[in-house]
Amino acid sequence: MADWMIYGATGYTGTLVAEEAVRRGHKPLLAGRSEGKLKPLADRLKLDYVAVSLDDTPALQKAVTAVAAVYHAAGPFIHTAAPMLRACLAGATHYLDITGEIPVYQLAFSFDSAAREQGVAILPGVGFDVIPSDCLLKYVADQLPDATHLEVVVDALNTASGAGTNTSAGTTKSMLEILPRVGNVVRREGNLMNIRFGEGARWFQFPYGRRYAMPAPWGDVEMGYHTTGIPNITAYLTFPPSLVRQFRLVGPLLRLALQAGALRDLAGQLVDRQMTGPSEARRSSGRSWVYARVHNTRGEMRQAWLETVEAYRFTAEAGVRVVERVLDGSYRGALTPARAFGADFVLEIPGTRRHDTMPTQ
């Protein structure tokens, strides 16, 4: 009998996680809506499966109660997290997901007391968003306990190897859902604040050269606050300057247009047909980088860089290790990855290196 479930197992990331789980000797229960999609994957990996919709509360409750933990990989999580969270709480089952969606993080932490009462953990964001950045920002914040400002820069698109990455359909559709709801946000004096697209864009130094980055609603704007308590947080994603200029022009219009559900649905259909996620070769050769810096009111500063494998590969390899930790531990309540496992957890993922000074290539 399986002791944990992968829901959304036939999606791009869910399949990678299932394959990694088997490599590490696990036999998770595969789950999702479509038996037609689940059966071929289950047969290939020699795993059990259950077809269940998130809308079928009794069937979902029965499936979730039968396992100790659920690894939720079916997005957009703005639509899927709530029913799965409630099912896990009712079944006293640990909940993990790979969301990068700020409203979902807020929802997850709203269930902190309920999770503690049930004796289970709620751990959102246990993929590339946000394990590497969350662990790195905790590392630098711990060196400067009175830090008031935090900046984190994620370079998962422009990598030193040139292999880069592209996104899966699920990731892209999550972006389409979040853009009209959240917009572009930073944290100031403890509160989320909207800013214009492209505002605050600047250059940052990485080992392989400078990268241009703009503030973006990356998960650390929310999760970093829970991890460190630092009241001023800006998360940046790297983009070419030309693309940032386009964001400045079309970002507000795109956000307005996507508020129409019919247009979002149409865009989602196009994404399903065109976005396949990075190839195996790209996952094998790609590298991703994170930079984090904190400072206090006296001008003292701490910084560090983190190098990882390609983002989707990282998500699969890290996700299974998170499940192992949760099943073997006594974690309770809503937690960020770094709060649960510490700043050094990320270093357990093969191919990950942390640098206190600018590394040389």
Image (cartoon, helix red, strand yellow):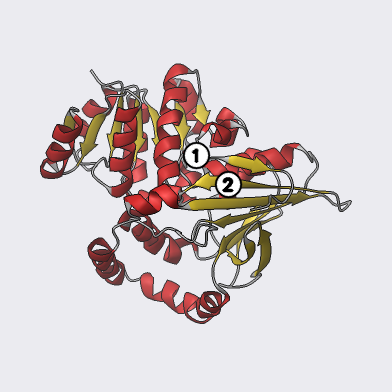
Q: Secondary structure at mark 2?
A: strand
Q: In the rendered view, does 222 fall on the left or right side of 163?
A: right
Amino acid at dot 2 = Glu
**Which image quadrant is residue 154 in?**
bottom right
Q: From the top left corner, tell me how far across and down residue 273 is, in percent.
A: 22, 64
Say if 34 sits above or below 182 in the image.
above
The reply, left or right, for residue 291 in relation to residue 30 is right
- Any mark on residue 307, and which? 2
User: What residue do we see at 30% from left, 21% from top?
Assistant: 3
Q: Is residue 15 visible?
A: yes
Gap in angstroms between the C-alphas marked 2 and 1: 32 Å
Q: Which mark is residue 222?
A: none
Viewed as shown, does residue 343 lie left or right of 104?
A: right
Q: Residue furthest right?
A: 298
Extreme residue toward the left, this view: 36
Which quadrant of the figure has residue 138? top right
Q: Mark 2 or 1 closer to N-term?
A: 1
* Helix, strand or loop status at disc 1: helix
Where residue 322 sits, quadrant-wise, is: top left
Q: Residue 291 in the image: state x and y as whole percent.
A: 64, 52
Q: Is residue 223 visible?
A: no
Spot occupied by residue 280 in the image (x, y as percentages of width and height): 33, 50
Q: Is residue 58 above or below residue 215?
A: above
Q: Amino acid at mark 1?
A: Ser
Circle 1 residue: 110
| Left or right: 70, with 195 as reference point | left
